[in-house]
């Protein structure tokens, strides 16, 4: 019989895998997205939100300096050392992902609130959980996943 500690460890591993590990892509759907650099330089293409909108109002799990950024400032954020660097990295990736999910002509695999393609969790909730958790590795893993989905194909808006 498994001990409570080993059972808890197994549950944590399963949850982390579902939340943080990118699911295998199916060949039937082409994932598209635009990079943070695209969104930074094409503000006229933004839908559902303005560049000066508060990042912290969209992702209320963000704290400190990151919460006070605008969406445009989040796209310009640069990573760095420690938890604060990971927060900035995640802010940049999350802002681009939000814009991709909002655009009518971008078939992005993430949804703002509901499950996305391949069982991806809701974007806002996943980002808020990562910020609230405060763990650098968790934030960087999610930022990497979001960046991967935003950078792997040509932007359909170019």
Image: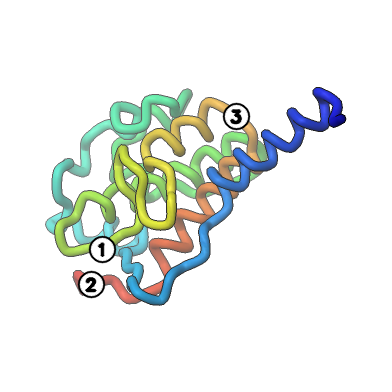
CA distance separating discs 3 and 1: 30 Å
* Residue 136 x %, y %: 64, 39
Decide: few, some or many residues near mark 1? Use Cα within 10 Å; few <14, some 14-19, many ≥20.
Answer: some
Asked if the residues shown at circle 2 and circle 3 are in contact, with their CB atoms under 8 angstroms apart, the answer is no
* Residue 101 x %, y %: 27, 52
Question: Where is the C terminus found, in terms of image quarters?
Answer: bottom left
Q: Which residue is mark 1?
A: 107
Of discs 3 and 1, which sits in the foreground? 1
Mark sitting earlier along the chain (2/3): 3
Question: Where is the N terminus found, in terms of image quarters?
Answer: top right
CA distance separating discs 2 and 3: 34 Å
Q: Which residue is mark 2?
A: 156
Quadrant in the picture for residue 138: top right
Mark sitting earlier along the chain (1/2): 1
Mark sitting earlier along the chain (3/1): 1
60 sits left or right of 57 in the view: right
Quadrant in the picture for residue 61: top left
At numbered mark 3, what does the secondary structure look like: helix, strand or loop?
loop
81 sits left or right of 101 in the view: right
The residue located at (19%, 70%) in the rendering is 157
Looking at the picture, tell me which residue is in the foreground, 50 or 28: 28
Q: Is residue 49 above or below residue 67?
A: below
At numbered mark 1, what does the secondary structure look like: helix, strand or loop?
loop
Asked if the residues shown at circle 1 and circle 2 are in contact, with their CB atoms under 8 angstroms apart, the answer is yes
Q: Is residue 111 above or below residue 57?
A: below
* Residue 125 x %, y %: 41, 33
Kindly give the residue lying farthest to the front in the view shown. 1
Q: Which residue is mark 3?
A: 134
């Amino acid at each position: 019989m498994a001990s409570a500690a080993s059972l808890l460890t197994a549950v944590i591993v399963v949850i982390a895998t579902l939340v943080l590990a990118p699911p295998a892509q199916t060949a039937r759907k082409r994932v598209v997205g635009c990079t943070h650099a695209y969104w930074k330089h094409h503000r006229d293409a933004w839908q559902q939100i303005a560049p000066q909108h508060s990042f912290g109002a969209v992702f209320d799990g963000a704290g400190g300096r990151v919460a006070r950024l605008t969406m445009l400032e989040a796209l310009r954020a640069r990573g760095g050392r420690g938890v604060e660097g990971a927060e900035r990295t995640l802010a940049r990736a999350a802002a681009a992902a939000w814009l991709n999910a909002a655009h009518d002509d971008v078939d992005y695999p993430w949804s703002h609130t509901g499950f996305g393609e391949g069982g991806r969790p809701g974007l806002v909730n996943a980002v808020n959980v990562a910020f609230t958790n405060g763990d650098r590795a968790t934030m960087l893993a999610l930022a990497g996943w979001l960046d991967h989905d935003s950078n792997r194909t040509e932007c359909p808006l170019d």
